[in-house]
Image (cartoon, rainbow, N blue to C red):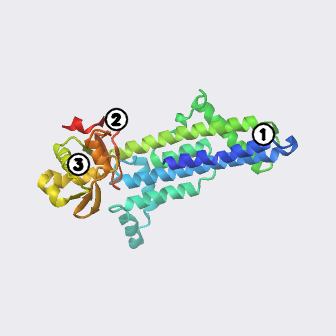
Amino acid sequence: MIRSLNNFQTNLKDITVLLDLSSIIDSSKQRPIFRSSVVLLVALWEQFIEQLAERSVTVLTDRLRDSTPLPDNVKQKIALVSVIEKRNNPQKFSESVWMFADKGWKIAYINYCENLTSNFHTASPKNVRELFMKILGIRDITKSWNYLGLPPSTCVEKLDDLVSLRHDIAHGANERYNVLEEHKIREQTNFITSIAQNTYKIVFNHTADLSFTQALEYSLAPSYFSAIIEFAARKGDKILTLKEIKKIGSSAQGNHNKLCYEPWALLEKIDQSTRRIPDRLIQFFKNEISLPLEILVFDNKEAIAKPGTREVLFSELQ
């Protein structure tokens, strides 16, 4: 999801370029630049909201093993738009119901979100609030907004005013010339940046909380991991075979692949019977680097350090 925020912040540089340009031209020619800056600012904000919404759903469908953690109101809305109610066509009704079988709910969830974002044309506070309520069950994401100590309610008013200004510009209204000034547009850009960061943080944390409920948890603490690491580090070459791992013990044989997960990355799978020993394992064995004690593994095999886990040296596992 961080890509949606990074793209937004990168694209905002175009507004800075426009405003810098306005400062070196005749003041009589600045107005088109200011108008374009406001239109672009609101467009980038809308694009960010759409991308963040879609990416949050992608993260959930990648990570979750089933739909149980999704808020009830979200599951209900997905079902309402996905299942054909007219039972006089048994085939189509059956197809719409059975599409949820196994992993089918993931496709339905993605389609549901894409339908909402494709019809999302104005990122006003009201529309942003409704979008994240519908796709993630967040009751009022605007409650997280703040800017220079301003309360959420004032931030909502500021965004409404900016969206309204963009609407006026697009429709040729000319009553608000006084707002089209360089320093005011720079301030609006800073404001939008702030609430975009607020929005991202809430969506990131909410998505994480939902996905963590079904993650598998593994720890470096079991002794068979230490035995594998020590054996591999003392081998003198970069290859470890399953036959060698089997000699360490049945637990080592059954669990050694967990050391391949990215937060640890202490082994690399070459083929069904061979593992590569990376330099990282040697460094860990020599206490040159530390690693997270616990990791979380999701349905798509993505793995991250468990929030709050401590970093450990190999010597601490002995």
* Residue farthest toward the front in the current orientation of the protein: 236
Q: Name the residue under label 2.
A: 308
Q: Give the number of the disc on residue 233.
A: 3
Earlier-in-chain disc, 2 versus 3: 3
Q: Residue at x 38, y 65 (%)?
A: 99
From the viewer's perspective, is the residue at label 3 or at label 1 nearer? 3
Say which of 279 and 14 sits in front: 279
Does residue 214 show up?
A: no
Residues at badges 2 and 3 in contact (C-beta under 8 Å)? Answer: no
Q: Residue at x 26, y 51 (%)?
A: 258
* Element marked by disc 1: loop
Compared across the picture, whether 73 is left or right of 5 comes to left
Compared across the picture, whether 27 is left or right of 56 comes to right
Does residue 20 show up?
A: yes
Q: Residues within 10 Å of mark 2 (few under 14, many from 20)?
A: few
Alpha carbon of mark 3 to alpha carbon of mark 1: how far?
65 Å
Three-letter residue code for mark 1: Leu
Query: Is 226 rendered above or below residue 299?
Result: above
Q: Residue at x 61, y 36 (%)?
A: 156
Compared across the picture, whether 207 is left or right of 249 comes to right
Alpha carbon of mark 2 to alpha carbon of mark 3: how far?
28 Å
Instruction: Give percent across and percent down for residue 225.
Output: 20, 46
* Element marked by disc 2: loop
Q: Name the residue under label 1.
A: 180
* Element marked by disc 3: helix
Compared across the picture, whether 312 is left or right of 18 comes to left
Instruction: Give percent across and percent down for residue 191.
Output: 63, 36
Instruction: Give percent across and percent down for residue 234.
Output: 20, 49
Three-letter residue code for mark 2: Gly
